[in-house]
C-alpha cells in the first residue's frame, strides 16, 4: 500500500509487483509517495510540457512563463527527497525554457550536482516554413542527487568502435589504437626530447608537454607501447590495446537519431498502442533505453511524473527495472494502461521489445 489516501487500485498481472501507475496530478501523488519512496528512486526521468504555447490533443502547453516556472519548481522540490543518494534526475526540455529551467535546477539540486546538458537530435528535416533557424534538437538536463556519489554506467562497446582498433605492426597482444602523447596543460618536467627510430628529434608543440615523465616513456618504449608511424618517423603516440581498455565506453553529450531514435520513430511506436488517438509528443523507446541503462541497474526504481504515453515505464519494465508513473490526463487510460498491459501480457512488439523478450510481472493502477 502506498499510503492511506490511495486505498483503491486495480492490480494487473502479478499481485506481488510493486510497480505503480497513477492517474492524477503529480504534485499530490509525489507528496503521497514520500513516506514509501524517500531515498529509494535511482532515476527520475521527466518530459514535462515544454511551454511551447501550443494546445496538444492530450494536454495544454500554454502557461505564462512565470506560471510554468512555478509549476516546475513545486514539482521538482517534491521529487528531491525521493531520489537515492546515488540517484539522478534527467529532464527533457527545448529552447523555450531550457535556460530558465537550468537556473531553477541549479537552485533546487545545487550547481555542484550538474552533470550535463545532453543534445538529442529529435528530427532530421528542417521545417521549411521557419523564418529563422529550424530547431532540430531538444536538451536533456542531468543532475545527480550527489555528484560525488553518482556514476554513469558505461555503454556497451559497439562493432563500429571496436573496428577502430587495428594491428599495424602485428603486435602479439592483438588490435590496438593510438592516442596523443601530449597534453595542453604543460608541466615543465614533462618537456624533453624524443628521438624517433628514423633518427628525427621531436619535442611537444609550443605550449604543450608530453603526458608522461621520461622514465615512463622509456619503459613504455621498451614494451613496444609507443607508435612512431609505419615509417618510424612520426610524433610518438601511445598504443592502447583493445583487450586492455575498459569493458564499455563513456557516454557523450550529443545523441543522434540514428542511435536513439527521433520524434518520427516515437510516433510510429505509439500508433501501435492507440491508432484512433495517436499521442502527439511521445519519446522513442531507444532514447529511454539509453537513459535507463546509463543511470540504473536491474531492480532499481525509475520514476516518471509526466508519463504521457508511458514510454518510461514501458522501457523500464522491459529492462527489468521497477517503475512508478504519474499522468494527469486521459492518456493515462488511453495510452499508459494499454501499453503496460500489453507488455505484462507479452503482446508488446514496440521498440525495445525487439531486443529484450520481457513480459510478465505486473503493476497497480491507482485513480487518485
Ligand atoms: C510531453 S508529454 C510526456 C510524453 C512522454 N515522455 C512519452 O514518451 O509519451 C507531457 C505529459 O505530462 C502530462 N502532465 C502535465 N502536467 C501534469 C501534472 N501536473 N501531473 C501529471 N501529468 C502531467 C501531460 O498530460 C502530458 O501527457
Image: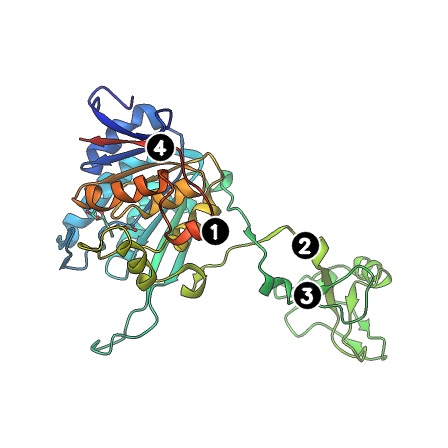
Which circle's residue, 4 or 1, is located before the other in the chain?
1
Label 1 CB less than 8 angstroms from ligand 1: no
Which circle's residue, 1 or 3, is located before the other in the chain?
3
Which circle's residue, 1 or 2, is located before the other in the chain?
2
Badge 2 density bin: few <14, some 14–19, many ≥20, Cα 10 Å: few
In front: mark 1 or mark 2? 1
What residue is drawn where x is 18% and y is 54%? 277
Tell me the colour scheme of the image: rainbow
Task: Give the spatial CA distance, label 4 vs label 2.
Answer: 40 Å
Badge 3 density bin: few <14, some 14–19, many ≥20, Cα 10 Å: some
Which quarter of the image is occupied by the C terminus?
top left
What residue is drawn where x is 20% and y is 32%? 28
Task: Give the spatial CA distance, label 4 vs label 1.
Answer: 20 Å
What residue is drawn where x is 44% and y is 42%? 358
Residue 166: quarter of image? bottom right
Which circle's residue, 3 or 4, is located before the other in the chain?
3
- Tag 4 and tag 1, C-beta contact below 8 Å: no
Which circle's residue, 3 or 2, is located before the other in the chain?
3
Determine which residue is flagged by label 2.
Answer: 245
- Image disc number at residue 355: 1
Which circle's residue, 4 or 2, is located before the other in the chain?
2
SS class, disc 3: loop
x and y percentages locating residue 149 in the rendered image:
50, 38
Amino acid at each position: 500500500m502506498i499510503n492511506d489516501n490511495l486505498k483503491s487500485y486495480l492490480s494487473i498481472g502479478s499481485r506481488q509487483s510493486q510497480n505503480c501507475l497513477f492517474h492524477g496530478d503529480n504534485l499530490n501523488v509525489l507528496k503521497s509517495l514520500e513516506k514509501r519512496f524517500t531515498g529509494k528512486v535511482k532515476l527520475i526521468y521527466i518530459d514535462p510540457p515544454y511551454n511551447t504555447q501550443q494546445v496538444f490533443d492530450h494536454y495544454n502547453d500554454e502557461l505564462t512563463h512565470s506560471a510554468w516556472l512555478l509549476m516546475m519548481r513545486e514539482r521538482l522540490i517534491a521529487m528531491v527527497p525521493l531520489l537515492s543518494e546515488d540517484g539522478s534526475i534527467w529532464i527533457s526540455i527545448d529552447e523555450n525554457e531550457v535556460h530558465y529551467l537550468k537556473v531553477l535546477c541549479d537552485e533546487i539540486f545545487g550547481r555542484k550536482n550538474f552533470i550535463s546538458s545532453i543534445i538529442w537530435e529529435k528530427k532530421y528535416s528542417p521545417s521549411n516554413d521557419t523564418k529563422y533557424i529550424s530547431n532540430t534538437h531538444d536538451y536533456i538536463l542531468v543532475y545527480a542527487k550527489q555528484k560525488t556519489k553518482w556514476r554513469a554506467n558505461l555503454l556497451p562497446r559497439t562493432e563500429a568502435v571496436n573496428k577502430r582498433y587495428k594491428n599495424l605492426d602485428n603486435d602479439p597482444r592483438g588490435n590496438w589504437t593510438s592516442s596523443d602523447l601530449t597534453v595542453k596543460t604543460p608541466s615543465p618536467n614533462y618537456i624533453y626530447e624524443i628521438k624517433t627510430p628514423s633518427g628525427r628529434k621531436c619535442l611537444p608543440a609550443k605550449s604543450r608537454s608530453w603526458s608522461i615523465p621520461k622514465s615512463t616513456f622509456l619503459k613504455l618504449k621498451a614494451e613496444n607501447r609507443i607508435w612512431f608511424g609505419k615509417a618510424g618517423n612520426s610524433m610518438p603516440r601511445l598504443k592502447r590495446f583493445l583487450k586492455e581498455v575498459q569493458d564499455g565506453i563513456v557516454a557523450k553529450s550529443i545523441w543522434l537519431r540514428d542511435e536513439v531514435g527521433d520524434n518520427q520513430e516515437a510516433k510510429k511506436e505509439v500508433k501501435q498502442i492507440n491508432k484512433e488517438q495517436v499521442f502527439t509528443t511521445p519519446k522513442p523507446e531507444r532514447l529511454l533505453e539509453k537513459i535507463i541503462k546509463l543511470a540504473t541497474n536491474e531492480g532499481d526504481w525509475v520514476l516518471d511524473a509526466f508519463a504521457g504515453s508511458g514510454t518510461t515505464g514501458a522501457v523500464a519494465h522491459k529492462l527489468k527495472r521497477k517503475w512508478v508513473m504519474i499522468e494527469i490526463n486521459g492518456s493515462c487510460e488511453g495510452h499508459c494502461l494499454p501499453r503496460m498491459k500489453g507488455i505484462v501480457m507479452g503482446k508488446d512488439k514496440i521498440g525495445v521489445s525487439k531486443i529484450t523478450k520481457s513480459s510478465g510481472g505486473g503493476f497497480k493502477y491507482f485513480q487518485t
